[in-house]
Image: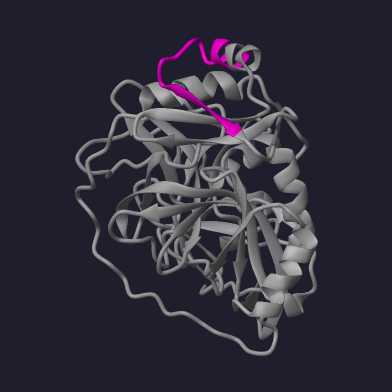
Amino acid sequence: MNYTLKRAAILTFVLIFTFQLKPSIKSSASYVDQSRALLAYEKLWNTFDWDCDGCPIYPDEYGGEYIDGDKLYLWIVGLTDEIQKKYHSICDYSDKVVFLNANYSLNELDALKTQVMNLPIEYHITGCVADRRENKLRVYLQEEQKENIAMLKQLLGDVEFIIEKQNYMTFCSTNLYAGTTLGASSGTFTLGVCGTYNSQPAILTAGHCAPHKYTSIRYGSTSGTVFATVQDFQFEDDEIGDYAIATINTSQQNNYLTTNILQPYFYPQNITGTVLNGWLPVGTNIYAYGSVTGLVSGTISQMNMPFKGNIYTENNWTYYEIDGLFQVTPFSANTVTGDSGGPVFINYSTMGTQFQGTISGSTSSYFYYSPVSYAQVAGFTVKTN
């Protein structure tokens, strides 16, 4: 299975990327410990409501957040001493929180993002996101043409925005990994994490690896034993997130028991994980594990990103949009074909390992993941003991 996304703006030709496999990584860049900043953010996150898609509903004055070093920075529109005291109290008076006066709320930026993404395809918009580090709108263009930029200025008025050139995002095909690879009818992929769905033992992986209900998941390879069946998936038709939930078949439940070990062969030790209740801020140090590449580390560089693209299946191109993906800038090797569905997690001495989502794919500069909250809203529960 070789899934390749390209932007819906490029409808006149097809580009197919071939990934070169890279060796597994046995070490990663040294990190500043961000545990206390993340704990402060988790306190704040617990005050947000969720919508029906598993996305947070932000207060009107909230302008976003990011981590830099070991500090959590919070943007607040109309910052006053009273509002600062309110948010500082929510964050348990952490000395790792720094407040910034925002020009725009996240709600404002997200509304503008929707307008930009609804522009006709001839404007070559490939993505748009509320940049939380800059408190501005970041617009991704396939071509930085003067007329496109002029049109954006007319649409956005006095709102500041950043232009970034980006042709397309490419999804990996993949391997399901809980000690070995798994496959669907057309390829292999990686296990994200185990858990339950409708009280049945279940596994979570990437939706584009098994893009229809009742896909059979095989153990070991595409010719292995059928041991699980997809019950719910999401990755296309303007949906949010990229996940597949598969329950272990009744006849196989004694052979393939679910576990809370995210990656049994993770170097140098096993990892057991819990779930951090929320999305991680931009600037968070993060790990990912794919069954082909091994361990990859990086930092979250953008969040809640929409992408338009297409996928090639059975001699046809199917066009769709995936929203709500997180972008990660890797420190060393990137994820490759076969890594999709793999676990994405943080790992700090004071917080332990906390599962965040599953790998969705990569470009030459970034990899992308879908947060676990989307699957949780759909009924998946991560196994934590």
For the record, the magenta segment spans: 86-101
Figure quadrant of residue 165: bottom right
Vertical comparison of 315 with 289: above or below: below
Q: State the residue in front, 365 or 255.
A: 365
The residue depicted at 68 percent of the width and 25 percent of the height is 48
The residue depicted at 39 percent of the width and 65 percent of the height is 336
Left or right: 292 with respect to 190? Answer: left
Figure quadrant of residue 72: top left
Q: How is the image coloured?
A: one colour
> Which x, y percent locates residue 280?
50, 36
> Which x, y percent locates residue 188?
46, 64
The quarter in which the C terminus is drawn is: top left
Q: State the residue in front, 65 or 369.
A: 65
Residue 87 colored in magenta in the image: yes
Vertical comparison of 133 with 331: above or below: above
Report if residue 9 is visible in the image: no
Extreme residue in the front direction: 158
Report if residue 99 is visible in the image: yes
Number of dots carrying numbers: 0
> Which x, y percent locates residue 313?
64, 77
Q: State the residue in front, 373 or 9.
A: 9
Q: State the residue in front, 41 or 86.
A: 86
